Image: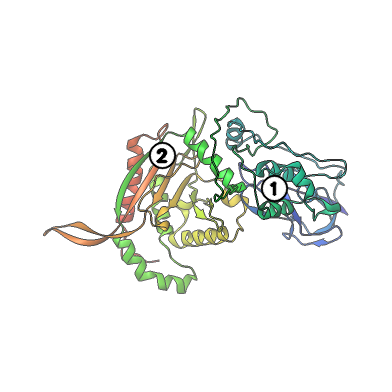
Amino acid sequence: MAKFELKLPKMGESVAEATLTSWLKEVGDTIEEDEAVLEIATDKVDSEVPSEVRGVLIEKLFEVDDIIQVGQTIAVIEIQGEGAAVDTSAPKVETVAAPTKEVIAAVEAPVLEVTSAEVQSSDTRFYSPLVKNIAGEEGVSQQELDAISGSGKDGRVTKNDILQFIENRSSQPLITEVKQVIKEIPVKESHAASTVSVSVNGGDEIIEMSRMGKLIAHHMVESVQTAAHVQSFIEADVTNIWNWRKKVKDGFLKREGENLTFTPIFLEAVAKALKDHPMLNISIDGDKIIKRKNINLGMAAALPDGNLIVPVIKNADQLNLVGMSKAVNDLAKRARGGSLKPDDIQGGTYTVTNVGTFGSIMGTPIINQPQVGILALGAIRKVPAVIETPDGDFIGIRFKMFLSHSYDHRVVNGALGGQFVKAVADYLEAWDVNREI
């Protein structure tokens, strides 16, 4: 018999750790190859960890709510065949990846302290790092935490217990400052933010930001403070696309079993424009520019709780319209269902957001760091327009939309930023109404 170490796999370039949320297998259970053994959660998505081998689970090295580093051994599986026995006395880490730019940026960000005192474990009750983390961010005091009835082993308070308490408590303390998510990492410098006194009347309601909401807020503020945002706008005539889609969408649905929306059409044009203008498919690392080989398009998608997430279509320039449509529909469906994997939101090189979904005709989106550009798609409107013909100009009804391009003026000048969005519009306006799909 041999023993196989099941390790936490790499889940993206900026994901260094995950929280164990539940075990799907118990010691003594038989596990098939590729069968899920446990569930984990990162800052944005939940995921399953499958086994690479077939065997019997003989040891668990972590408990629910424990934080696991990428590369750490989570469990030991006994398999058929020869092999060296492993030391299971303690979790092991073979290799720890160097901090990525996103992690370094988060570490160097200003730290704002929360007014509530940090909770502590006692001789009679242990709190996991995750539970203490959530308690600190949500303003849960030591007394409140000690009063929570735990559903875990030996009455231990789990992640679900504290989240349920936060959701149900009738009054929540007003947190005037947001605590940095990354804990126990020294920072280079700390700038104290001025505290603004907020008056609360009897009829006002205090709503605590969700964990993801705090992360998004931090990411947005960091982006505005980092990148020199500037915008270019252009109006595109998408009448040909409107008429073509109306003609082919029913046949496409019948043949492919997928809805043909406007999004994959727009993403195809963006991918082509990025191929023509590779200096927008870049990232900034200090004073260096990283020119990305692959074109990976981030697609902002709304979650059921109102937050936004950006799943990524990898190698978008290599997909035909059918492949692009299937990728868009799959990621959107899994985003709404909360089943995205960590890798699904990693590696984006440029982002597209559809503000037209909410009726907006244009917007000025914030760049998704460490990228240097983001394109907002406005609502498609039926408008009167001047139509030029060999026989003269006349007024006609056309379908038009605004494209709003935000880009980082540190490395993208106005000429390149304007040329790129113009290229996207040109591809859309040149759409072949007789195109086969």
**Residue 65 horizontal/vertical position (percent):** 75, 49
Name the residue nearer the viewer: 62 or 222.
Answer: 222
Q: Nearer the viewer, mark 1 or mark 2?
A: 2
How dense is the environment of label 2, judged by Cα within 10 Å: few (below 14), some, or many (20 and up)? Answer: many
Left or right of 152 on screen, residue 402? left
Residue that appears at 48% across and 70% down: 256
Q: Give residue 124's quadrant in the image.
A: top right
Q: Position of residue 12 (x, y in %)?
A: 62, 45
Residue under the image location 20 percent in, 62 percent down: 396
What is the distance, in whole Å, between disc 1 and disc 2 at their CAs? 34 Å
| Of residues 419 and 32, the one drawn nearer to the viewer in this rendering | 419
Q: Which label is found at residue 376?
A: none
Q: Earlier in the sequence, mark 1 or mark 2?
A: 1
The residue carrying mark 1 is 9
> Which quarter of the image is occupied by the N terminus?
bottom right
What's the coloring here? rainbow
Is residue 36 shown to the viewer in this render?
Answer: yes
Q: Residue at x 35, y 70 (%)?
A: 247
- Residue 271: x and y in percent read 42, 50
Callout 2 secondary element: strand
Q: Which amino acid lies under the numbered mark 2 shown in the image of this protein?
A: Tyr
Q: Nearer the viewer, residue 115 or 314?
A: 115
Quadrant hosting residue 100: top right
The kind of residue tagged 1 is Pro
Question: x%, y% of residue 337?
Answer: 59, 61
- The answer to whether residue 370 shows anywhere in this view is no
Image mark for residue 407: 2
Q: Estimate how packed mark 1 is, as few (under 14), some (14 to 19) or many (20 or more) residues with alpha carbons within 10 Å.
A: some
Most foreground residue, 205 or 64: 205
